[in-house]
Image (spheres, rainbow, N blue to C red):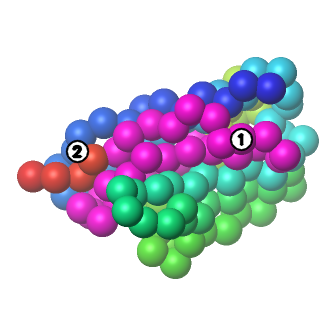
């Protein structure tokens, strides 16, 4: 199983980005998918989760700003990030079931 996070970039505070998690070799809808992030010098932080039954959970720091979703037809999981803050700057990773983290994607929030 290979996981690939994409969609990161440089965005101004208050802006939005949508991250994608592509999984090859498994079916994402059968498992829990988690998004994590890690900033330089900091511990890995839980960001969001979607279960096989589409129950969603969020880390306290992103509640109300980030939304996790899944497209079963495309076998993709997304993380919509709105109202971004400089403290959201990190490398974002996805885990699917027992697999991961795969290659992350850098998100930089800066003016």
Disc on res. 39: none
Judged left or right of residue 49, residue 93 is left
Asked if marks 1 and 2 touch (Cβ < 8 Å), the reply is no
Asked if the magenta segment contains residue 86, the reply would be yes
Judged left or right of residue 20, residue 89 is left
Residue at far front of view? 41
Q: Is residue 13 above or below residue 93?
A: below
Residue at image point 24% right, 52% down: 109
Q: Is residue 12 above or below residue 73?
A: below
The x, y position of residue 89, in whole percent, is 32, 55
Residue 5 position by quadrant? top right
Q: Give the residue pinned by disc 1.
A: 100
Q: Quadrant of the N terminus?
A: top right
Q: Is residue 107 above or below residue 37?
A: above
Using the image as rendered, state which of residue 78 and residue 9 is in the foreground: 9
Residue at image point 67% right, 68% down: 57
The x, y position of residue 100, in whole percent, is 71, 41
Residue at image point 38% right, 52% down: 90
Residue stretch in magenta? 78-107
The x, y position of residue 69, in whole percent, is 63, 47
Using the image as rendered, state which of residue 79 and residue 40 is in the foreground: 40
Q: Give the residue pinned by disc 2.
A: 11
The x, y position of residue 93, in whole percent, is 56, 45
Residue 70 at least partly seen: no
Query: Upstream in the sequence, badge 1 or badge 2?
Result: 2
């Amino acid at each position: 199983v290979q996981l690939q996070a994409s969609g990161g970039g440089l965005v101004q505070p208050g802006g939005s980005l949508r991250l994608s998690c592509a999984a090859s070799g498994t079916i994402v809808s059968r498992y829990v998918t988690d998004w994590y992030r890690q900033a330089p010098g900091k511990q890995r932080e839980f960001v969001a989760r979607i279960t096989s039954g589409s129950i969603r959970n969020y880390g306290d720091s992103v509640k109300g700003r980030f939304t996790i979703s899944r497209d079963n037809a495309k076998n993709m999981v997304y993380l919509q990030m709105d109202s971004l803050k400089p403290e959201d700057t990190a490398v974002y990773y996805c885990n699917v079931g027992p697999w991961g983290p795969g290659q992350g994607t850098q998100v930089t929030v800066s003016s």
